[in-house]
Amino acid sequence: MASVSRLPNPVAAEWDWQLLAACRGVDTQVFFSPEAERGTRRLARERVAKAVCGTCPVLAACREHAIKAGEPFGVWGGLTPDERRAYVAGGRSSDRRVLTVEEAEPRLRRERSA
């Protein structure tokens, strides 16, 4: 469960970035997997979600939110829950420059194979 204490204040200015998100109007099932989804189906769905994220003008804000809030589910800011955990475990603070999806994916693949 996401940590509510780390969520932004209920002030519109802190959530306004969502109004510009590329995922607005896209079915949430693209970003959140069904409980039993595994393997190729999950990877295919995540690829579609990441493609949407790759066009998003607020990708960095989305990723920062997901990391700070400890979002446990779904693709946020172009990263899956496992990728976000690896991002945080690797000592990357969300206060530092946020990587784009294109920058993060190769780095995460290298970390997984090590």
Image (tube, helix red, strand yellow):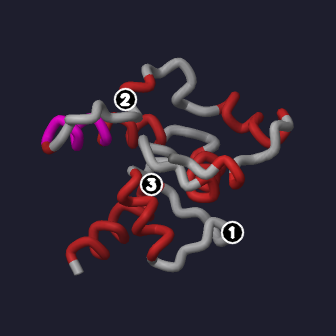
The residue to which callout 3 is attached is 101
99 vs 27: above or below: below
The residue to which callout 2 is attached is 30
- Kindly report the distance in space between the C-alpha atoms of the residues bearing marks 3 and 1: 17 Å
70 vs 25: above or below: below
Expressed as whole percent of the image width and height from the top left, the position of residue 48 reads 33, 35
Question: Where does the magenta region start and end?
Answer: 40-46
**Left or right: where 31 falls relative to 35:** right
Mark 2 falls on what kind of element?
Answer: helix
Residue 70's label in the rendered image is: none
User: What amino acid is found at the position of numbered circle 2 in the picture?
Assistant: Val
N-terminal of the two: label 3 or label 1?
A: 1
Mark 1 falls on what kind of element?
Answer: loop
- Kindly report the distance in space between the C-alpha atoms of the residues bearing marks 2 and 3: 17 Å
**Left or right: where 101 falls relative to 9:** left
Q: How many circles with numbers are drawn on the protein?
A: 3
The residue to which callout 1 is attached is 95
Q: Residue at x 81, y 37 (%)?
A: 10
User: What amino acid is found at the position of numbered circle 1 in the picture?
Assistant: Asp
